Image: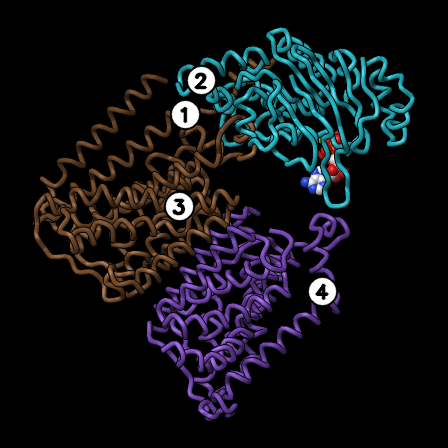
Amino acid sequence: MISASLSMLPAAIINGLMYGAIYALVALGLTLIYGVLHIINFAHGAMLMLALYAAFFLFHLFSIDPYFSILIVTPCAGIFGYIIYRYGIGPLAKGKDQNILLITLGLSIIIENSALFFFSGDQQTVNLSYGFEAFDLGFMYLSYPKVISFFAALFMCAVLWAAMSLTDMGRAIRAVAKERQGARLVGINVEHIFAVTFGIGIACLGAAGCMMLPIFYVDPYTGNIFVLVAFTIVVLGGMGSVVGALVGGFIIGITESVGGLLLGESLGQIGISLIFILILIFRPTGLFGSKV
Amino acid sequence: MMSNFRSHLSFLLLGALGLIILPYFITSRFYIDVLTLIFFTAYLGQSWNILGGYAGQFSFGGVMFFGTGAYVSSILLTTFGFPPIFGIFLAILGGAILGLIVGYMSFRSGLRGSYFALITLAFAELLRVLANSVEFTGGGVGLFLTYAPGLSNLQFESPVGFYYFALILMFISIAIVYWLESSRFGAQLVAIRENEDAAEALGIDTLRCKIYAIMIMGAMGGAAGTFYSQKYLYLDPPIAYSIHLSVEMLLVTIVGGMGTIFGPLVGAFVLHTVNEIARHFIDTPGLSLIVYGLILIIIIGYLPNGLIGAFKKKEKKSESSSLDKNQSREEP
Amino acid sequence: MLSVNNLTKRFGGLLAVSSVDLEVKEKEIVSLIGPNGAGKTTLFAMVAGFLKADEGEINFEKASVVGLKPHQICQLGMVRTFQITQPFAGLTTLQNIMVGAYSNTAQTDSAKKKAEEVAEVVGMTSLLSQGADGLTVAGRKRLELARALATDPKLLLLDEVMAGLNPAEIDDIVTVIKGIRDRGVTIFLIEHVMKAVMNLSDRTYVLNDGKLIASGTPSSVAENPQVIEAYLGHGAAEAMAEGA
Ligand SMILES: Nc1ncnc2c1ncn2[C@@H]1O[C@H](COP(=O)(O)OP(=O)(O)OP(=O)(O)O)[C@@H](O)[C@H]1O
Ligand SMILES: [Mg+2]
């Protein structure tokens, strides 16, 4: 049993890496929002689920390939995020940390149950023409979608990083993250920047949803699975740390698949919440972060 | 002030008496069940209220005490034939011990606000996965309890029995919060909620107080677990550690009014009524929860002190004209 | 009563408090002055257990309080107020003061009685039923003082309880502080208002850039060239002028 598991270890690690890249993208959105707004978006998982559905329906109704949908869903998600923060979360929360947590909790309940109401509780998957083709690595087969998703996620992370460091908007966002009051004084519209950041965070989910659909499934509860995963990555990497989110994504991806292999499907999930608890208790600044 | 309190108390006793004799006038099983559920949720909300409303520490994983209590008394019953009427006390103990562990670990490392909320969520999740993977909980298959009505099993043939069971739990929870309102411990919790540094500076052992608060919450949740498992005779990890119950606990309290004696009861009453009415018109899964989510957002945005807070404000406004005069005159 | 030896605190590269020695004797009113950012609040925070010192000893009534938590230090009889007032905003003045009073009694009635007594001493009786969030600056400063006093301290650490008050209010609170000392409470206070410092203190310590640069009677300290330089250098000449 153990030796059989060990021989499958390399495959589990590579699988974990593939998912890890997408997790990193999901966590990147969350950590960006935290780093700039200092708020926790509890609806992150639910919004990811919406993105998965968007990709699903684009495929189901219009036969648009999920990887092509990235170009459609990402900007739409960004606009959705901007609007919902600027005209919903922001004004309602009045700047209180716990209010935001509760409002985004309410939002996640609404999104999840609206999905249940409109889309039913059935699991949905897509069948891509190339879905079952795979690279033969000798010790394992690696399906095309996993590989495409892996590189697409890495590419998106790179694009985001470039945008944050090279564009004016990126600079403004970083200014607000560093010195909120100062930024306000030099005439930056902080509320706008907050909403833009929130929008970018949700846009990450839009892209991640499209990449995840071909290698996963979607149902109204998918968000629940990922909400703790995303928080764990972000806490592991250090709240607000971009590098942390990337590395954390891979660590969690691998932990999950290796944990599943060694401990079995059911107990394998324990890793996520255990890591989350241990990190918060013993190293609340995460592996890379310096502030909480 | 005092006479105000007296009339308050007699009003309360009258209300309590009304609830006690109510089953003699209601013959519909449906209404009895709904009321039972309202009391049960109000009770759980009250447990959340002590830590969240009074001490200001919001938890997203309050269900963990409920689930653990439910497993304690149910496993004792199925494995050792231990009667739940005693088992409920071990469930209470189990909940309190879990509260001690979770509280010690998280408060000692200084977790506050959103971080505390999330770590309780993670603890509940951890326990759910554990309960799913070990043998003695029945794993994913769950635990089936046998139907054997009788006081020693805390099972009742008539739904009225459970009505009184829930009513007693709720009365106890109100008594606990009543005591909090007038005791030093309650004042210390409120001080911690309002400003933890100032509380610590003024000699309050904030860590200890918060741990006591979560232990009380845990103890109360434990008893709720026994109630549930004896009423529904089935338990599995998704039920025992469901996030929905965690949310419901905070929801009824926030809707009714955090840090108030009757907030959870008012909230539970309003939400269950809304739920039943919504179900009456469209019985589709998820609809009532959509409404719950909307209510939560609206309350946070517009009525941060809940329904009771909104009501009190109105009352104050009509009084305030005379009060204002008093104060401006006395100002040195 | 309180003695501090070689107390040091660093924030990253910044030496906020550097090898400070000082002493407060029973029944004294001792003041700690110095320009903005000198490290005064940091020193109080360490003494009261809110910050961990990097080096040094803090003894209260001959016993070390290093490593104790703020509430334990409060229970020993040493309590601080906050420069940036920290009221329990959602509570009334009475409830605020009662929190302090509860440190010596579990009885609600006696805590209430104690709070009312203290309110009398600091002149807040008429504000007892007012919400703390509605208090003026002067009211909040008084509330800080009242809450601390309600714990029945032996030593009160007052951090700028006069900042932001007008001259009449300052005179008021100076009288109150003297009254508290006459009731047997030792007082250690941080203050920028020189007039009050001169008027109140038996002795004064001067902190600059984390280091103690002078100590002695208020008038001798005010004439110390090093002190004048420190103040003038930091553009705090107004503070001196105010005292004159
Ligand atoms: N938590 C902290 N982290 C980093 N630096 C700090 C911290 N607290 C204080 N400082 C720095 O330490 C120095 C001393 O600050 P402190 O508040 O003790 O000064 P102070 O003498 O009380 O000044 P003021 O008269 O303005 O109240 C300042 O330079 C301040 O910026
Ligand atoms: Mg200061």
Q: Quadrant of the C terminus of chain C?
A: top right
| Mark number, residue A169 | 4
| Label 1: few (<14), some (14–19) or many (≥20) C-alpha neighbours in 10 Å | many
**Same chain assignment for discs 3 and 2:** no
Secondary structure of the residue carrying numbered label 3: helix
Q: Which residue is mark 2?
A: C111
Q: Quadrant of residue B310?
A: top left
Q: Quadrant of residue B166?
A: top left
Tell whether C160 sits left or right of B128.
Answer: right
Instruction: Residue at 47%, 25% (x, y): give it.
Output: B320
For chain A, what colour was chosen? purple
Q: CA distance from mark 4 to mark 1?
A: 53 Å
Q: Residue furthest top?
A: C182
Letter of the chain in cyan? C
Q: Label 2's element?
A: helix
Of the numbered discs 3 and 1, the one sitting upstream in the chain is 3
Q: Position of residue A50 (x, y in %)?
A: 46, 70
Residue B267 point in image, percent of width and height: 33, 44
**Residue type, mark 4 in image:** Met
Mark 3 vs mark 1: same chain? Answer: yes
Task: Name the kind of residue labelled 2 in the image.
Answer: Ala
For label 1, the residue is: B184
